[in-house]
Structures are given as C-alpha cells and as structure tokens.
Image (tube, helix red, strand yellow):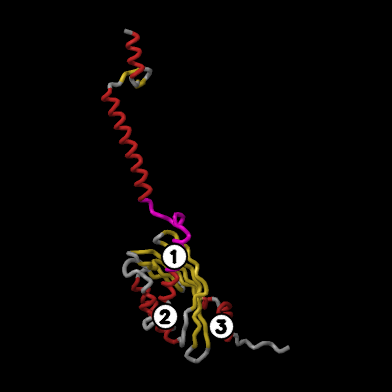
Amino acid sequence: MRLRFSRLLAREPLYTFAAMEYVLPHPARDWLRILSFLGGLAAGGAIVTSVACSPRTGADMSASEKTAIADTLKRLVVSAYDLSKPDPVKSLMSLYPTEGRVISASGGVLTTTRAELEKGIKAFWTYVGQNMRDPHWEWTSMNVDVLAPDAAVMTSTYRIPHVTPMGIPHVIGGAWTAVFQKRGGRWVVIQEHLSDVQSNPNIQMNMNPQMNMTPQPKP
C-alpha cells in the first residue's frame, strides 16, 4: 500500500503551501495550465500594445527621415517668403494654422492669435515692404532640429537687399526661430520669435557699408 501511494505521489505534481503537500487532481492541473497560458498572452499583449501606442521621438527616427522633414520645411519657408509673389501677406500667412493659438514675438511685442499676427504682417508690408524696390529675401542660414515625426524647430538668419525710395541700396535682416507642428498632414508654425538686426546699429552698419558716412580724420 505504501509503495503504491509513493508511486502515485511520484507521478502527480505537488502543490506546496506552508509545508503541506497536496496532490492536485487532473482538472485542477489543466486549469492552472490554461490560466498560466492566458496570463502570458495578456502580459505579452500589454507589452506590444504599450510599445505600439508610444509616441515616436526624434531619437527613434532615422537620419533620412529627419533630413526629409528638414528639406520639406526649408522649401516651405523659402516659398512662403518669396517676395515676388503677387500677394506677399497671403503667402506669409500660409505658414500658420487657420485656427487655434499662434504665439509670435517680435520687437518686444507678443501676439497670441492669427488675427493679431496677420495685422502685424500687413503693417510691415504696408509701411516697409511696399517701400522697398526690387526686394529679395535671402536666407543666409537654416538650422532645423527634428523633434518628432510631427514636430520640428528651425532657427534661421536672413537679409533683404533692396533699394529705398530715394534710390539708395539698403539691406535689412535678422534671425527667426519657429516651432513647426504637423497638423492634418500640413506643417504649420505654432510659435515663433523674430529678432531684427536693425536693433543693433553696429551690425546694421556692417550690413550696409554705404551707411557709414562718418568723415575720416585727415592724417
């Protein structure tokens, strides 16, 4: 009898709890296997779902993906700032979303809506742009950092050589930083900061050598 009981125990899996051993019947063992299998599937599915739903960042992107986005933004900006187009204000405003908040800082003034931004651009073109003869917007540098598949930041410098109404060659310029976001398949500027080089007379003098009219002392 003891031998048979020992052989039975040897064939059956044991469940240990507080130094007590119980022989599990076959149905219970089957349920444990099923529950263990289902638990593994649930854990694996949770991991896959978590990875699949995690937003991508710039660190997850390849160099070619970042380059493609950077090139797209550069072409977009160059086209929008083409002053030869019939409606420069409309062209410039094409960079911004048609709805929602738009943060723009320039000359110590901050605006937060598209309407305010458009008002400022119209004022620039009315009092400055229209008085420039043969203006040409030149980008002297463009630096793009791609933050994610739908986000990037660009910092650029520019100059606008032109002729004043008095026939004098003149150049204005500055630096521009813009935060881009892709919305509905379209890249738009949601925040920007414009720094006008005219605020620094020394730099402006270097950009416009003809302005240096200070008489030189005689030897």
Amino acid at pointer 2: Phe
Mark 1 falls on what kind of element? helix
Q: Residue lying farthest right?
A: 219
Q: Kindly identify which residue carries mark 3.
A: 208
Please identify, in this view, whether the residue under mark 3 or under mark 1 is nearer the observer: 1
Q: Main secondary structure of the magenta part?
A: helix
> Which span is picked out in magenta?
53-72
Give the answer, above or below, for where 132 lies relative to 101.
Answer: below
Q: Is residue 2 magenta?
A: no
Counting other residues with Cα less than 10 Å from the Cα at mark 2, is it few (<14), some (14-19), or many (20 or more)? Answer: few
Amino acid at pointer 3: Asn
Q: Quadrant of the C terminus?
A: bottom right
Please identify, in this view, whether the residue under mark 2 or under mark 1 is nearer the observer: 1
Tell me which corner region of the image, top left, top right, bottom left or bottom right, holds residue 100: bottom left
Q: Kindly identify which residue carries mark 2.
A: 124
Say the numbered circle drawn on residue 68. Answer: 1
Q: Residue at x 36, y 82 (%)?
A: 87
Give the answer, above or below, for where 42 lies relative to 115.
Answer: above
Q: Quadrant of the N terminus?
A: top left
First in sequence, mark 2 or 3: give its number: 2
Say the numbered circle drawn on residue 87. Answer: none
**Foreground residue, 94 or 171?**
94
First in sequence, mark 2 or 1: give its number: 1
Q: Is residue 64 magenta?
A: yes
User: Between marks 2 and 3, how big is the CA–CA gap?
Assistant: 20 Å
Please identify, in this view, whether the residue under mark 2 or under mark 3 is nearer the observer: 3
Is 2 left, or right, of 199 in this rendering?
left
User: Between marks 2 and 1, how big is the CA–CA gap?
Assistant: 32 Å
Tell me which corner region of the image, top left, top right, bottom left or bottom right, holds residue 28: top left
Q: Residue at x 47, y 82 (%)?
A: 136
